[in-house]
Amino acid sequence: MVVFAFMATRPGSSLRKWTTFRVSYSIIVIFCLLQFILCVTWLSIAPPFAQYNTDIKPELIVVDCNEGSPIAFWTMLGYLFLLATSSFIVAFLARRLPDSFNEAQFITFSMLAFLSVWVSYIPASLSAQGKYTVAMEIFAILASSWALVLCMFFPKCFFILFRPEINSKDNIMRKNKESTINVQ
């Protein structure tokens, strides 16, 4: 929305109608609803179930989780990849906005970390068997979540805890005045 807002301020721009809060809420609701529909469809058509596996070690019976429908599983992963890729592209385009809107750099790096975890997960999951597949899914979920948390919130926490003098209204206002003076 911030990218649209900056593009809409240009003279003669037709993007002004896309900068309302209703548009951003609509986008969130539509994509959440789409993911909900995909999940419900997957769980109603072919729900996951426990499967006994003796192929890995014939002397042991290993209980695996069968995803039910591999097509539905990869569709959900593809949808998450589509959301992460579009977030990365938008954040990459917004990285050069003025300093007061400079969250885009953190979002870009966190989306890059998120995408790299999931892109490396795909060949690893195709080569794993049995209980190792579930362990890799859990590792990918945890690694991507921690990448998001560390890349987006660690810099903020650092400035709040260790550099509180930079995190003041006076400092931000002074910085904005200096940038406006330098532009003129």
Image (cartoon, helix red, strand yellow):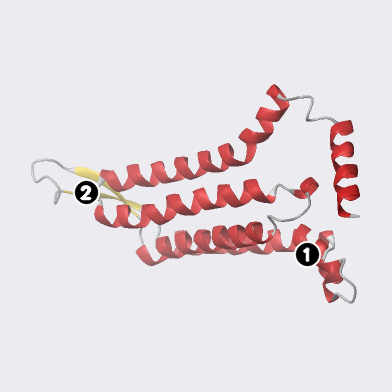
Quadrant in the picture for residue 173:
top right
Which image quarter: residue 168?
A: top right
Residue beneath disc 1: 4
Mark 2 belongs to which amino acid?
A: Tyr
* Residue shown at the point (59%, 63%) measured from the top left: 86
In the rendered image, residue 121, in percent from the top left (x then y), is placed at 37, 52
Residue 137 is labelled as: none
Q: Provide the residue designation for mark 2.
A: 52
- The quarter of the image holding the N terminus is bottom right
| Residue 16 falls left or right of residue 158 | right
Residue 61 in the image, given as x and y percentages of width and height: 16, 43
Point 46% across, 40% down: residue = 142
Residue under the image location 57 percent in, 47 percent down: 110
Q: Is residue 12 above or below residue 169?
A: below
- Quadrant where the C terminus sits is bottom right
Tell me the distance, in whole angstroms, between the alpha carbons under discs 1 and 2: 52 Å
